[in-house]
């Protein structure tokens, strides 16, 4: 059966996979085939994605929250459609209608103290902007991040992350980018005590590390240390922001006002690439000193700003907040009862709102679960830097019926994955 998409067509899924290897990315294409997830996303709608074969999957990866509001959310689509009758990406050299409107809306909903917005086109660029901003404000170079951090793949961002990402491109720079263990305050203090650090960058819950939760008081103490040792605190809210934790920004739950906060992914409803960095007055100096200090043609593209205004408005609705609280309660309870069935295998649930890290008793456990979930119509991804843990991020607007269906499917898949691991004769970690 031929697949005609109007702008292009393919004879079969096999043809796409072959050409994907030939012209696009052989390593990535083969990786998913080998992992037992030979997915080529075709139709996408709400919280469903469809493989080219027609197979339907409930998406609980949502590209790290990019599709928090569902795929092709009708309100976001319609905002973009009408935006296109007047706007394009705009011209980043000039004052801009949509960039200004979105900046005002972002600041209105931001943690106290953040006063200005700088735009990027993706999360990595925004992290680079945040790090450059901190270096300018403090006139220091060093950036502290956690061991097994992930803040993107761009020039500076990649150096804050695990060697898994930086080494390939000779980008590890341990002198300027020291990494300290998560939840270890003594190590953090040791890194800061010399007062030569520009900023500490922290995800509020580190996603690629499998959502380990910060110990009570940890983030607050890191912020206090930053103040004590003249470093800025950068909150990476790319995955934890936009109502994922039941608050618009995860960091607000800790009562922390970061010096710099980064958002991306879900900010424009997965329909247009845009990211934003919110800065306080302490950090904002370069914007007055040299407004052309960071240049990005597509940063804050005006059509993207309009998509973001709509997404932000949806995320900020009281009914979205109550939906998130309802779903997190329902899914949390459901997961705990599945855990009761397999306590030796399903060994932990890390949860904050609709961010869940599901821990399994095998070093590669989440990969086994991912494969069985895929077979049973659910897409969720293992954590790259800790494959024991499955990232499970149900949508913010998931219906109660779909939550129940998701739990039913998860229960079956988790049970089967346990048998797979036992059959493979693997030892629990
Ligand atoms: C926490 C976090 N920060 C930054 C990024 C980088 O975003 P992007 O892929 O848009 O460059 C990601 C991407 O996954 C992320 O998860």
Image (spheres, helix red, strand yellow):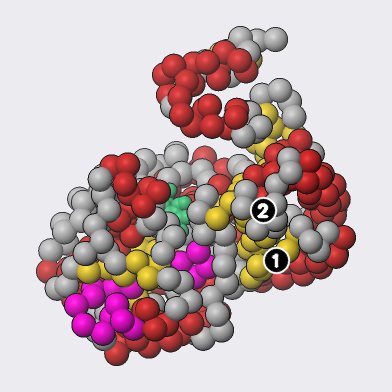
Front residue of 365 and 375: 365
* Residue 106 locus on image (x, y percent): 43, 67
Q: Secondary structure at mark 2?
A: loop
The picture quadrant where one finds residue 156 is bottom left
Quadrant (top left, top right, bottom left, bottom right) of the N terminus: top right
* Residue 333 locus on image (x, y percent): 81, 68
Few, some or many C-alpha atoms within 10 Å of disc 2 (few <14, some 14-19, many ≥20)? many
Q: Secondary structure at mark 1?
A: strand
Asked whether residue 190 is drawn in magenta, I would say: yes
Asked whether residue 187 is drawn in magenta, I would say: no
Closer to viewer: mark 1 or mark 2 = 2
Q: At 60% from the left edge and 29% from the top edge, which residue is drawn?
A: 34
State whether residue 230 appears in this view: yes
The picture quadrant where one finds residue 353 is bottom right
Answer above or below: position of 380 versus 22. below
The picture quadrant where one finds residue 198 is bottom left
Q: Are marks 1 and 2 in contact (CB under 8 Å)?
A: no
| Distance Cα–Cα, label 1 vs label 2 | 15 Å
The answer to whether mark 1 is within 8 Å of ligand 1 is: no
- Identify the disc placed on residue 362: 2
Front residue of 194 and 204: 194
Q: At 22% from the left edge and 64% from the top edge, which residue is drawn?
A: 176
Q: At 52% from the left edge and 68% from the top edge, which residue is drawn?
A: 205
Residue that label 1 marks: 349
Extent of the magenta region: 189-206
User: Residue pushed farthest left?
Assistant: 289
């Amino acid at each position: 059966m031929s697949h005609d998409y109007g702008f292009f067509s393919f004879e079969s899924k096999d043809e796409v996979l072959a050409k994907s290897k030939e012209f696009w990315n052989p390593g990535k294409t083969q990786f998913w085939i080998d992992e037992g997830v030979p997915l080529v996303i075709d139709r996408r709608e709400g919280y469903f994605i469809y493989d080219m074969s027609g197979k339907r999957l409930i998406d609980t990866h949502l590209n790290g929250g990019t599709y928090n509001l569902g795929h092709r959310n009708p309100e976001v689509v319609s905002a973009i459609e009408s935006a296109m009758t007047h706007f394009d990406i705009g011209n980043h050299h000039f004052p801009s209608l949509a960039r200004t409107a979105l900046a005002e809306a972002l600041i209105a909903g931001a943690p106290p103290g953040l006063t200005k917005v700088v735009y990027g086109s993706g999360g990595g660029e925004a992290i680079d902007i945040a790090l450059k901003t901190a270096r300018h404000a403090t006139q220091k170079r060093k950036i502290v991040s956690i061991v097994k951090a992930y803040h993107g793949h761009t020039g500076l961002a990649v150096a804050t992350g695990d060697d898994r990402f930086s080494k390939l491109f000779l980008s590890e720079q341990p002198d300027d980018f020291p990494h300290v263990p998560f939840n270890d305050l003594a190590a953090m203090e040791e890194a800061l005590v010399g007062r030569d650090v520009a900023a500490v960058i922290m995800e509020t819950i580190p996603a690629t590390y499998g959502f380990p939760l910060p110990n009570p008081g940890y983030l607050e103490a890191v912020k206090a240390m930053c103040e004590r040792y003249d470093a800025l605190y950068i909150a990476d809210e790319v995955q934890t922001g936009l109502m994922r934790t039941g608050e618009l920004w995860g960091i607000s739950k800790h009562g922390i006002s970061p010096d710099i906060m980064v958002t991306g992914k879900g900010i424009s409803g997965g329909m247009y690439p845009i990211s934003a960095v919110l800065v306080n007055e302490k950090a904002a100096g370069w914007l007055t000193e040299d407004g052309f200090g960071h240049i990005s043609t597509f940063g804050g593209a005006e059509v993207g700003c309009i998509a973001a205004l709509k997404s932000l408005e949806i995320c900020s609705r009281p009914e979205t907040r109550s939906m998130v609280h309802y779903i997190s309660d329902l899914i949390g309870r459901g997961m705990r009862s599945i855990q009761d069935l397999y306590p030796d295998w399903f060994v932990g649930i890390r949860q904050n709102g609709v961010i869940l890290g599901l821990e399994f008793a095998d070093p590669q456990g989440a990969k086994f679960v991912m494969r069985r979930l895929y077979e049973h119509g659910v897409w969720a991804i293992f954590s790259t830097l800790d494959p024991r843990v499955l990232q499970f991020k149900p949508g913010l607007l998931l219906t109660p019926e779909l939550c129940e269906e998701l739990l039913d499917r998860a229960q079956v898949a988790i049970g089967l994955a346990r048998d797979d691991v036992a059959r493979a004769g693997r030892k629990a970690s």
